[in-house]
């Protein structure tokens, strides 16, 4: 049993990962998978509708599931099904609770939107559930509301948002930030609703067909009217109505769904529905893509899955023939969305962490090997995920805060694998499990702000420097964190358990020292490369920008550790305490400086993260204190074992 | 050796000093980063990094007391520490090559930053499409230019830096037949139409635009994208007495003209200029955005460079991360204005620009050698240990 356990666990993990490659479940007869792969242009990037659905839901309500706390089944099976309703059946979509407004986070916003106690409070019909809700195991209040619930106060929300907008983001009050965010979420919803058809049209396909038939006569009538001659009133009216509708769609819709003529690869030539409809007046016919989407909508509402599937397949094949590159990326991206490699890896890392911890108590060989295998699997999955993102974006791995979290985790785990290969004492696996899990958790929270593959501002737009400076400096962050976490293991095991023997302590010391050396090299070279980039683009090698200062602080702190060590100013525990403080310095330059909201590098202001940062720093300081308490208070290294 | 000298030597070559200085620099950088929220990047640099001591102004008084070592102090001490330690312990052998290379690189980097701090020129050039300019303008400094326009062939210019005006004294210059008396200086102000006598406490201008406007002092701005626009009351006084008082400010676009003893003079308070021996003409500015967004994708300026001696006359494209280096200056694409009709180039002259590059190569190489040696030693030991039993 002990022999085959590692292999068994490896097999289980592999099966778990492989399960992600299956297509997602679909409870309807509609071919939503192909629908989700259709490419559109949004926020400067061609992406599948599946991504549009997922990122829109994340932006609006902080999760991808559309559900009601009192109903166990989700309201929409998948994000793409929700999006299809938003596009084609808005009356239904208007009732989905997809706007997050929490009474505990933003009571002022709740009262602004006129949400009543009945709307907020959840009454479960079942007494067990009521008891669970009392104990906070089930939510007692609703935090997500539907468009219809918010509709009566939309004008008021817009007014408040306009009042808040001129105030600079950093000095906005909590309420001002919330109204702007809530308004933007509603605008996003309206934009989606008006991306393919006019939401209040009873039958948009019919409307388009009538318009197309009336076009020749209509154009004639318009020209005649301009000359002041007699004209066909009916045809003219059809023209005027459609012109109005087209400009309404053009103004509101934000998806560019109509691709340019075949062979034209310029992404700026993708057009929104409204613009393409206006072009119909001069072209004499309605664009085929618009007609196809209108037919899809008709079939969706009629529940006619056969027609829907036929048209969606034809549309997909047609686009694939004309834009093979865009379609390949779109297909892969929707596949990637469904596979969720980072989420799956998180589970594996957590499992590996516990296995490795237990290996210190029982079955050291077997459990350590099992943990190592799981880490390898998770590392392979995250590597595949990062590579996929790189191919989709055509960019080096780190382009924003989200991808830096992925990369820091990946880099640290990679180093851990090397350490584990050399030392085989499960320490590398414990560190890998912990860092891998935590960084992916951080990444998950960062992804809640929307599309994680957004376009880069011109200033940052160079692959050479992104590939060198950003990658190297992020590796430096990763290594500094790793040294800190290894030191944590030393302190926790030494102070709280008896499991830290002299040999392990010495091995940990060598690991920390080696990783600090590596971290110094990477952070120094990375920082300096950043200086060269800055000199190339802004004419100054060093500008004391907060992000630059943060990187400099990491370099300086690593230099402090090395000099203390070389000068004999610290021994093992001192080295560990210094390395733990490295966590504080690194978390500051990774996240803290972004919270300042100043400087060229700031990615965005994150209020919630601020409290987490404070808590993290406090915990690290506590651990440093723990490292510094007299040795005879430690559980390890009691006199009997300190003979070495 | 004298005991005192030895103590000094031991102090300056000690590794403890290095660690203390490094920790001090860490604190300095941290506090300075925090203070950027209040002061903006330029004021922070002056207060924390380009100073010997960080001063703290006792509230409600003019007394400032040093509370923390500044960038020059810490940097200078680090440099001394580094050089002393190297001289004292210097012994050339291959084992120390990495460390020595890395530290020499650091010395070079610190020196380079010092040179940059002292000598860097950081200007702007704002060009409309079709416009040609011979000069760039400072980002923060202003000057009062007094021009003798009598001879149509050339202008005689006397430029008084803003720092001199701020002292509110009287300025006499061999090229000027009059003295310039600064009656009041406001570091940041705006002008509005109104009776100049309507603001008690301020001097009253009698000539030029000052006779029709009021000067409203403003709080200093520290925002990176805003600049302070000073306003100054100057009185022109000849041997025969006062010729009047003018208000000058960069807000006033037009020069103010007056006659003095048969010569025509102009007063312009303008952004401090640096004249170049070549001219730049903006041919075309382009600005692309990502489709469907306001996120800028690329800015670029097509300019013609023409040197005064006629040796250079060519077209270049300046865009993000691709500046023009010419005549000791570097021109970067920094911004744009006015519906993409105006480009803003940042003009930087830094005689020490190459030093960081050399320093970096030395430091990177040094660390690679040093850590590479350690790693090799470690692997050798492990293989030996593995082979032993």
Image: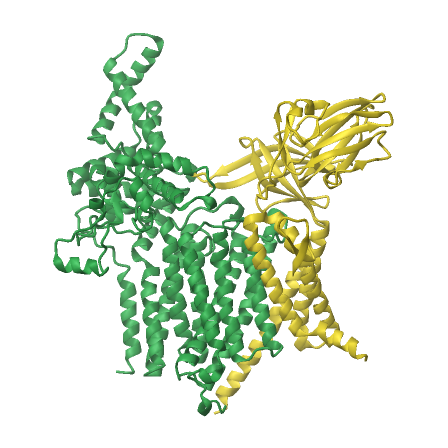
Chain colours: A green, B yellow
Q: Quadrant of residue A183?
A: top left
Q: Quadrant of residue A492?
A: bottom left
Residue B62 shows in this picture: yes
Q: Compared with residue B27, is residue B11 higher up or lower down, i.e. above or below?
A: below
Q: Quadrant of residue A315?
A: top left
Q: Position of residue B340 (x, y in %)?
A: 54, 32
Q: Nearer the viewer, residue B318 or A73?
A: A73
- Give the number of callouts: 0
Q: Residue at x 20, y 31 (%)?
A: A203
Q: Is residue A55 left or right of residue B208?
A: left
Among all residues in the image, which is located at the extreme top? A229
Residue A264 shows in this picture: no
Q: Compared with residue A13, is residue B54 higher up or lower down, i.e. above or below?
A: above
Q: Position of residue A177 (x, y in %)?
A: 40, 44
Quadrant, the N terminus of chain A: bottom left
Q: Nearer the viewer, residue A619 or A15?
A: A619
Q: Nearer the viewer, residue A201 or A603?
A: A603
Q: Is residue A24 left or right of residue A538?
A: left
Q: Is residue B208 left or right of residue A556?
A: right
Q: Position of residue B321 (x, y in %)?
A: 58, 47
Q: Residue at x 12, y 56 (%)?
A: A126
Q: Position of residue A303 (x, y in %)?
A: 15, 41
């Amino acid at each position: 049993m002990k022999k085959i356990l590692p292999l068994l666990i490896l097999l289980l993990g592999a099966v778990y990962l492989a399960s992600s490659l299956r297509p997602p479940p679909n409870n309807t007869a509609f071919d939503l998978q192909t629908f989700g792969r259709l490419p559109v242009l949004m926020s400067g990037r061609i992406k599948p509708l599946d991504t549009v659905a997922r990122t829109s839901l994340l932006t609006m309500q902080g999760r991808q599931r559309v559900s009601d706390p009192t109903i166990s089944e989700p309201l929409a099976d998948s994000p793409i099904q929700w999006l299809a309703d938003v596009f084609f059946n808005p009356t239904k979509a208007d009732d989905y609770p997809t706007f997050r407004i929490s009474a505990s986070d933003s009571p002022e916003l709740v009262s602004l939107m006129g949400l009543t106690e009945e709307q907020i409070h959840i009454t479960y019909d079942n007494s067990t559930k009521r008891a669970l809700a009392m104990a906070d195991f089930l939510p007692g209040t609703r935090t997500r509301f539907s468009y219809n619930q918010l509709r009566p106060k939309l004008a008021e929300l817009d007014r408040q948002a306009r009042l808040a907008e001129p105030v600079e983001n950093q000095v906005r009050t909590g309420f001002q930030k919330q109204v702007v965010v809530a308004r933007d979420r509603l605008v996003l919803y309206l934009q989606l609703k008006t991306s393919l058809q006019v939401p209040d049209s009873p039958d948009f396909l019919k409307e388009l067909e009538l318009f197309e038939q009336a076009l020749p006569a209509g154009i004639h009538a318009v020209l005649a009217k301009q000359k002041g001659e007699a004209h066909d009133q009916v045809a003219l009216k059809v023209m005027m109505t459609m012109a109005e509708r087209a400009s309404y769609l053009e103004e509101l819709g934000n998806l560019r769904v109509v691709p340019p003529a075949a062979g034209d690869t310029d992404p700026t030539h993708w057009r929104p529905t409204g613009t393409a409809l206006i072009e119909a007046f001069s072209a004499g016919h309605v664009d085929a893509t618009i007609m196809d989407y209108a037919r899809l909508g008709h079939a969706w509402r009629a529940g006619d899955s056969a027609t829907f599937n036929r048209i969606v397949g034809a549309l997909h094949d047609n686009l694939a023939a004309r834009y093979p590159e865009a379609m390949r990326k779109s297909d892969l991206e929707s596949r990637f969305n469904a596979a969720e490699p980072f989420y799956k890896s998180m589970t594996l890392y957590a499992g590996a962490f516990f296995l490795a911890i237990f290996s210190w108590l029982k079955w050291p060989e077997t459990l350590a090997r099992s943990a190592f295998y799981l880490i390898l699997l998770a590392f392979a999955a995250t590597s595949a995920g990062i590579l996929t993102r790189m191919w989709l974006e055509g960019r080096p791995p780190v382009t924003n805060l989200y991808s830096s979290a992925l990369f820091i985790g990946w880099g640290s785990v990679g180093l851990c694998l090397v350490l584990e290969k050399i030392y085989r004492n499960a320490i590398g696996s414990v560190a890998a499990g912990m860092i891998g899990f935590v960084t992916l958790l951080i990444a998950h929270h960062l992804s809640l702000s929307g599309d994680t593959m957004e376009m880069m501002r011109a200033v940052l737009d160079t692959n050479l420097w992104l590939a060198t400076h950003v990658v190297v400096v992020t590796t430096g962050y990763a290594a500094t964190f790793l040294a800190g976490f290894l030191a944590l293991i030393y302190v926790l095991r030494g102070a709280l358990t008896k499991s830290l023997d002299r040999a392990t302590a010495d091995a940990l010391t060598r690991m920390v020292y080696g990783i600090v050396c590596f971290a110094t090299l990477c952070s120094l070279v990375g920082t300096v490369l950043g200086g060269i980039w800055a000199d190339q683009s802004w004419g100054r090698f060093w500008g004391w920008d907060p992000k630059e200062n943060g990187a400099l602080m990491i370099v300086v702190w690593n230099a402090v550790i090395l000099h203390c060590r070389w000068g004999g100013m610290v021994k093992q525990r001192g080295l560990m305490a210094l390395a733990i403080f490295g966590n504080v310095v690194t978390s500051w330059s990774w996240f803290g400086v972004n919270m300042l909201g100043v400087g060229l590098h700031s990615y965005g202001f994150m209020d919630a993260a601020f409290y987490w940062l404070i808590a993290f720093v406090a915990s690290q300081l506590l651990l440093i204190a723990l490292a510094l308490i007299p040795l005879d208070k430690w559980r390890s290294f009691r006199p009997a074992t300190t003979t070495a | 050796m004298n005991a005192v000298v030895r103590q000094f030597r031991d102090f300056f070559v000690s590794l403890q000093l290095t660690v203390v200085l490094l920790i001090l620099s860490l604190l300095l950088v941290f506090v300075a980063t925090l203070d950027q929220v209040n002061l903006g990047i330029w004021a922070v640099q002056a207060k924390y990094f380009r100073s010997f001591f960080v001063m703290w102004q006792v509230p409600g008084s003019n007394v400032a007391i040093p509370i923390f070592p500044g960038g020059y102090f810490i940097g200078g001490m680090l440099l001394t520490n580094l050089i002393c330690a190297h001289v004292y312990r210097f012994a050339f052998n291959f084992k120390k090559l990495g460390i020595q290379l890395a530290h020499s690189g650091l010395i070079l980097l610190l020196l380079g930053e010092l040179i940059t701090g002292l000598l860097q020129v950081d200007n702007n050039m704002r060009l409309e499409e079709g416009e040609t300019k011979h000069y760039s303008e400072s980002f923060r400094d202003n000057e009062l230019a007094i021009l003798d326009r009598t001879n149509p062939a050339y202008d005689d210019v006397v430029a008084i830096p803003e720092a001199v005006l701020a002292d509110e004294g009287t300025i006499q210059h061999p090229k000027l037949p009059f003295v310039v008396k600064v009656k009041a200086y406001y570091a940041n102000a705006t002008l509005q139409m109104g009776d100049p006598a309507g603001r008690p406490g301020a001097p009253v201008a009698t000539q030029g635009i000052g006779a029709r406007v009021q000067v409203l002092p403003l709080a200093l701005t520290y925002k990176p994208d805003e600049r302070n626009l000073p306003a100054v009351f100057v009185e022109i006084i000849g041997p025969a007495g006062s010729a009047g008082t003018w208000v000058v400010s960069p807000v006033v676009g037009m020069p103010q003209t007056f006659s003095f003893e048969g010569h025509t003079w102009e007063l312009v308070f303008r952004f401090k200029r640096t004249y170049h021996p070549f001219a730049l003409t903006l041919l075309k500015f382009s600005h692309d955005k990502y489709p469907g967004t306001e996120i800028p994708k690329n800015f670029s300026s097509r300019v013609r460079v023409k040197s005064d001696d006629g040796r250079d006359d060519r077209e270049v494209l300046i865009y993000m991360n691709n500046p023009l280096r010419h005549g000791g200056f570097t021109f970067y694409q920094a911004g744009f204005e006015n519906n993409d009709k105006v480009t803003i180039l940042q003009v930087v002259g830094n005689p020490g620009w190459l030093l960081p590059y050399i320093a970096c190569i030395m430091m990177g190489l040094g660390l690679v050698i040093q850590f590479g040696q350690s790693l090799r030693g470690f692997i050798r030991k492990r293989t030996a240990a593995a082979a032993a039993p």
